[in-house]
Amino acid sequence: MENISLDLLPKDGELLLKALADGKMIIARSKNDFLYILDFNDQFHMFRHTPGAPGGGQRQFPKDEKHIATVRRFADISDAVYVAEYDRNLNVFSVMYTAEEGILAMFPGDDRESDGMVDFGA
């Protein structure tokens, strides 16, 4: 993935918040749904997408105590959490698409044995 670095992030809420504060994109995966989280203009921007679906959803929340706690919880309730570091000159929707394709290529989710390093339990 040119200009995009994608890594598996430990399921730790504080690491998730630090990555967001560092300007990285968080991708939380639950079954086959993806939630992309960005920290931008003192707000959390969240985009939801299911692979193969024509569209998705978008919401924005203030970075207040309530929403910080909610974002922190995504580390616990998601099947897997990924972090994407990318060139800020790239289109954010292209980054989300590329990250999703990369995750599905590495961890397709249809064969839990081949997704060995990802703990989908809990």
Image: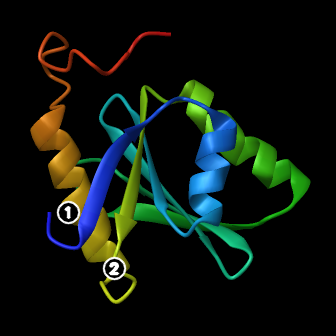
Q: Quadrant of residue 110?
A: top left
Residue 69: give x, y in percent of width and height: 79, 43
Is 70 positioned to the left or the right of 56 in the image? right
Q: Name the residue nearer the viewer: 102 or 59.
A: 102
Q: Is residue 52 visible?
A: no
Is 52 positioned to the left or the right of 99 in the image? left
122 shown above or below 64: above
SS under mark 2: loop
1 shown above or below 7: below
Q: Which mark is residue 69?
A: none
Q: Which mark is residue 87?
A: 2
Residue 89: give x, y in percent of width and height: 34, 89
From this viewpoint, which residue is outermost toward the bottom?
A: 89
Q: Name the residue nearer the viewer: 85 or 26.
A: 85
Residue at 86% x, 61% y is: 64
Is 13 positioned to the left or the right of 1 in the image? right
Q: Amino acid at mark 1?
A: Thr
91 shown above or below 100: below
Q: Quadrant of residue 8?
A: top left
Q: Name the residue nearer the viewer: 60 or 53.
A: 60
Classify 10 Å Cα crowding around label 1: few (below 14), some (14-19), many (20 and above).
some
Q: Is residue 87 visible?
A: yes
Foreground label between 1 and 2: 2
**Image label count:** 2
Q: Amino acid at mark 2?
A: Asp
Residue at 89% x, 53% y is: 65
SS under mark 1: helix
Residue at 23% x, 73% y is: 3
Q: Name the residue nearer the viewer: 83 or 37.
A: 83
Residue picked out by circle 1? 98
